[in-house]
Image (cartoon, helix red, strand yellow):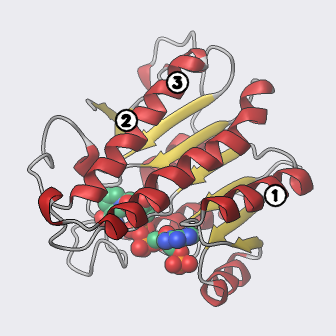
Amino acid sequence: MSYTLVTGGSRGLGFECAKALRALGRTVVLVAKDESRLKGAAAELDCEYRSVDLEDLGAARETFTEILERLGPPETLILAHGVMSEKFAKTLRTTNEEWRRVMAINLDSVFCAVNILGKPMADARSGRVIIFSACLGRMSGPGTAGGLAPYRVSKAGVNALVRNLAHETSHGARGFLIDAVCPNHSRTDMGGPDAPLSAAEGASTAIWLATRAFDASSSDDQERLTGLLWEERQVVPW
Ligand SMILES: NC(=O)c1ccc[n+]([C@@H]2O[C@H](COP(=O)([O-])OP(=O)(O)OC[C@H]3O[C@@H](n4cnc5c(N)ncnc54)[C@H](OP(=O)(O)O)[C@@H]3O)[C@@H](O)[C@H]2O)c1
């Protein structure tokens, strides 16, 4: 079965990605934690869903394995789940529990999803993985000013994971694409009501990555490059 799996699909940017892909006629499977919210989102989009607390790595592994066994590997995997760290979570003031919570959800479960679902995609030399990172996880440019330590470090870890796996899979030359996306500050529960971008605008680069033409021999960078961090459809430095 050809389908797109969207984590964080119950609301915010994940929901916007799922909605846009449904509108293009794609089969979509949503994953998130809160079952009743997820059920409502799935009903709105007329798609399947599976609820799991991705903070629990064992449960995450079980759920992704069950989806793989039932549906086969996804054609596209969009990882749009995530949590912000507590407001004053500076490195020297963060508890073990807060560090672990954010790392588990934002990074460990991303590894787990890619490890389980990305492997058969890469083996089949087909498919694309798009992971929501953040400019707060970059090591250069804006957003590197400190604070929100677990969140920033988890997203820097996501960036490193994408770059590493892109090298391991030959940067798209073998038919498997993996990219990170920075949505910019968007109006979602995480981004808040005063963010400059709508959720649809924040999701647009991820949707484009999920649907763009790709040809490793193209002379057009937007069709040729993968294994990178994208913002507004442009490559930005890590
Ligand atoms: N919004 C922004 O301005 C912004 C900026 C930069 C990067 N990002 C990144 O973009 C992604 C999407 O953000 P958003 O703004 O759409 O966030 P959001 O509105 O807060 O939605 C978060 C999503 O993640 C899911 N989730 C959270 N904890 C989970 C858990 N333990 N298990 C399973 N699912 C869980 C939520 O599911 P439930 O509904 O079940 O809780 C929800 O679907 C995140 O990775 C975020 O870091 C966002």
| Residue 229 circle label | 2
Marked residue nearer the N-terminal end (2 or 1): 1
> Marks 3 and 1, Cα distance to the nearest angstrom?
24 Å
Marked residue nearer the N-terminal end (3 or 2): 3
> Marks 3 and 2, Cα distance to the nearest angstrom?
11 Å
| One can see residue 166 in this view | yes
Q: Split into 4 quadrants, where in the image is the C terminus?
A: top left
Q: Position of residue 186 (x, y in %)?
A: 31, 66
In the depicted structure, whether residue 156 falls above or below residue 190: above
The local crowd at label 2, few if under 14, some if 14 to 19, many if 20 or more residues have their Cα within 10 Å, is: many
In the depicted structure, whether residue 74 falls above or below residue 54: above
The local crowd at label 3, few if under 14, some if 14 to 19, many if 20 or more residues have their Cα within 10 Å, is: many
The local crowd at label 1, few if under 14, some if 14 to 19, many if 20 or more residues have their Cα within 10 Å, is: some
- At x 72% / y 34%, what residue is drawn? 119
Q: Is residue 117 left or right of residue 96?
A: right
Q: Label 2 is placed on what type of residue? A: Leu
Viewer-proximal residue, 44 or 156? 156
| Residue 166 circle label | 3
| Residue 17 circle label | none
| Residue 67 circle label | 1
- At x 25% / y 73%, what residue is drawn? 86
- At x 29% / y 68%, what residue is drawn? 85
Q: Is residue 210 left or right of residue 202?
A: right
- Name of the residue lying farthest toward the front: 96
Dot 1: element: helix
Q: Is residue 194 left or right of residue 74?
A: left
Q: Label 3 is placed on what type of residue? A: Ala
